[in-house]
Image: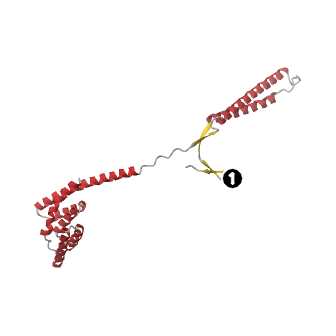
Amino acid sequence: MFHAFMRRVASGFALAGVFATLSLAAPARADDKDRAQAVFSEAKDLYKRGQYRAAVTKLEEARRLDPGAKELVYNLALVHEKLFEVDKAIPFFELYLTLEQDEDERARVRAVVKRLEGARADLEKQRKAEAAAASASASAAHPAPPPAPPAAQERRRGKLDAWVYTAGGVSAIALLGGVYFGVRALGSNPGSTKTGPDKSIRELQEDADATKSSATNADISLAIAIAAGGAAAGLYLLRTREVPASAVVVPVRGGAAAALEGRF
């Protein structure tokens, strides 16, 4: 694609003879005209020697002396095209179109502008392709770092969860119930089995039954409390939990060890 662009540009270089044939438009002042003509001659010599950048500088100097010279505009466009500076050549050719009155010449220059615009589009595609290739190459040369490994885990005995809390709660409630029924059994105990003026045999029997019932309930509640407490203790002690290894043990002199908190 680049060589095709070179071939297209080369067709425009045939116009370089304009340096030998075109003369400058008359400046407003004779001394400016003479100076501009001298600078233009220097630019033409530089162009012939292949010093295109220096020729551009001289052409710009001559144009400052004679701003209305359309040949200077044309030659600036031509040299920028020679330097493959398409973005600079096209505006000068378009400015030349506003200064040139000959329709055949205008048609020829419009064709040149159209060709350069196509070349500019090709160059832009090439730049984008090269940038994408460079980006892909950089990504391949510097791949993304691998993800960090998961933190080490260690297992410790003792796991608190809903089962432990439930069993512990049942044990606590049952223990309170046992205490309540035990106190009630003591309060309803008749203490004596003898009847008297203020105690009938029926009342004694009722007190004895209440005491027995409360004592039985107290025994059941205490049994439930012990069983639930044992279940809670077993659920906690007989199971393990995962804990992040967040401490590193560093041995020190004398056989002692120091724990450094942190994670790598």
Q: Quadrant of residue 20?
A: bottom left
**Position of residue 105 measured from the top left corner of the image (x, y, whole percent):** 12, 61
Q: Nearer the viewer, residue 254 or 240?
A: 254
Residue projecting furthest to the front = 254
Q: How is the image coloured?
A: secondary structure
User: Where's residue 182, x and y in %?
Assistant: 78, 30
In-front residue for pair 141/264? 141
With respect to residue 165, does 105 lie above or below? below
- In the foreground, 252 or 183: 252
- Pointer 1: residues within 10 angstroms few (<14), some, or many (20+)? few
* Residue 41 falls left or right of residue 201: left
Residue 175: tell me if it is visible. yes
Q: Dot 1 lies on which element?
A: helix
Which residue does the image show at 63% across and 34% down from the upper left?
163
What amino acid is at disc 1?
Gly
Q: Is residue 132 left or right of residue 221?
A: left
In the rendered image, which quarter is residue 39 located in? bottom left
Q: Is residue 133 left or right of residue 90?
A: right
In the rendered image, the vertical position of residue 209 relative to residue 239, given as above or below: above
Using the rendered view, name the quadrant where residue 233 is placed. Answer: top right
Viewer-closest of 86 and 215: 86
Residue 67 appears in the picture as rendered: no
Residue at point 83% right, 23% down? 204
Q: Position of residue 96 (x, y in %)?
A: 17, 64
The residue indicated by pointer 1 is 254
Q: How many marks?
A: 1
Taking the image as shown, residue 211 lies to the left or right of residue 229, namely right
* Residue occupying the far top of the picture: 202
Q: Percent x, y for residue 38?
A: 18, 75
